[in-house]
Amino acid sequence: MATNVKVVGTDLRQVTVKVTPGTYLTDVLEQACEKLKVPSSKYLLKHKQKQLDLSNTFRTSGLVPGARLELVIRSNTPAAINVALQLPPPESNLFPPSGRVTDKLPSDLTLWQLMRQFESGKSSQGKNINITARGVAQTNNGTAAGSGQLYYETPVLTIESRTLSTFADFQKTLSQLGYNSGSVLIRLSFRKTETTLADAMEQINQFFKTEEEKKAQESTPGPTAGDGTPASADADAQAPNGELNATQAENQETDASNAIQEGGAIPSSAPQEPSSDAMDVDEPISDHRPITIFSAPASGTPAAALRDDSDEAFAPRIEHAQAHQRLLKTAGENKRLPSDQELEAKAVAEAARVAAIKSIKIKVRFPDNFSAEWPFGPDDTGASLYAEVRKIMANNTAPFKLALPPGKTVIKDDSSPSSKLISGYRLSSNTLVNFMWDDKVPQAVRKQPFLKSSAAGRAQQVVVPKVPEVEGESEAGPSITSIKPEPRPNTGSEGSGFKKPKWLKGLGGKK
């Protein structure tokens, strides 16, 4: 039975989207963004301040007909997802007993790059798997027929109840399919097409060429006004690359005919040809200093604000008033100035305390609410902290500064003895440092993903410790508002507690 939901954009514009019980929430997001004329890759859906899992259908999402959904901006930094690829036989025999390979990949990875990542050997224990460049010969009742022409065998990905088999489907990312956290199982199969292997390779180059050019422009700067050689070199290199791909496809048709009859796969040189699609996800970030990366919170509301505390927990008690009185009394007493010996002894004690500190942990909070934590020793300076931050930044050339809360003290990017983290800035325990962009950084750079894909793939959720329950009133003592003065005994004849003096009794009496 069809129904509809209402989607409210960030500019408070409202659209209505028709849904059925089997409609995926990703389709709802795409239709709403299409009506609002905004890109669907930059937004998520929330319902009652709770982020929705876009991989669910309307039936399994728990939404009611006519629900009011909110369109919120997605975080620029991708999240890490555990991806398991179930292989068909005979490839599944290489990975007993389950026949699947797993890896931790970022959510902004396309399905094509995901398949290229698994067939590169990094996620498959060094075993090369041919997924995206398979060709089979034309057969008739199990025997070879025709001229031995190779036809492309396209991969078919099944995610839950959805089947993806076209090049347009392979350009979608995991995030666009609704997977922004957790894990996902993808089942792989193959289907023979009527397209020759050479034509399929040309289509692959056309579909994924634009994506490769965008990545090349982001990784390498453009030519300056005085030097135009990089642009011309790229234009000259496109022609020989196209000729090389055509010749390689022809060689594959002649050299792989015998191997196709056995396993249906082409030589291993074919999947290695478009090597630019593979992503270096598991690249080590630091070789000598351990790092822990924490992902951004899923909710925009702080966890402390979601707690329901009673008003009695904030009522001042007797011990609070007594402590305040002692503080006032101590502040009102006259104190003498410390002598030179006492100042020297205090300085020696402070130096001994600083020398006893062997290691501290510093957590840096980034603009997209991701954070990273490193251990530092007595010899580490502000330059060491800046260097570690630049290793995981996607744009490590942009200027920035690191400030201690509340932001008045800025750690300098200096390696002098006065800039040591422990002895110079007097950091003695676990410290939180805020990342702040320099005023010269443009808004376009600030809106880009902050962390590298390899760093974002290692992010983990922040574990919030359980806060113990507040002690009851009987254990902590009564509050100030509950103390009442004891009633005085009534000694007067009128019951008011006021006793008339003798000279007042004679006034107003009979004479």
Image: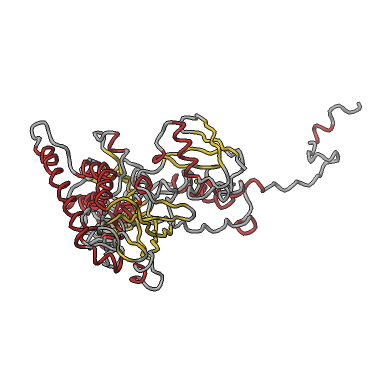
Instruction: Name the residue: 59% across, 50% down.
Output: 313
Q: Nearer the viewer, residue 248 or 392?
A: 248
Residue 137: percent from left, percent from top: 29, 60
**Could you say which quadrant of the image residue 449 lies in?**
top left
Residue 84: percent from left, percent from top: 39, 61
Q: Residue furthest bottom?
A: 97
**Could you say which quadrant of the image residue 148 lies in?**
bottom left
Q: Nearer the viewer, residue 491 or 237?
A: 237
Q: Is residue 103 left or right of residue 317?
A: left
Instruction: Name the residue: 65% across, 58% down.
Output: 474
Instruction: Please state, as top left, top right, bottom left or bottom right, where the N terminus lies in the image.
Output: top right
Residue 231: percent from left, percent from top: 13, 37
Q: How many marks?
A: 0
**Could you say which quadrant of the image residue 248 lies in?**
bottom left
- The way the protein has been coloured in the rendering is secondary structure
Residue 61: percent from left, percent from top: 55, 49
Instruction: Please state, as top left, top right, bottom left or bottom right, where the C terminus lies in the image.
Output: top right
Q: Residue furthest right?
A: 510
Q: Nearer the viewer, residue 478 or 401?
A: 401
Residue 357 in view (yes/no): no
Residue 311 in view (yes/no): yes
Q: Nearer the viewer, residue 51 or 422?
A: 51
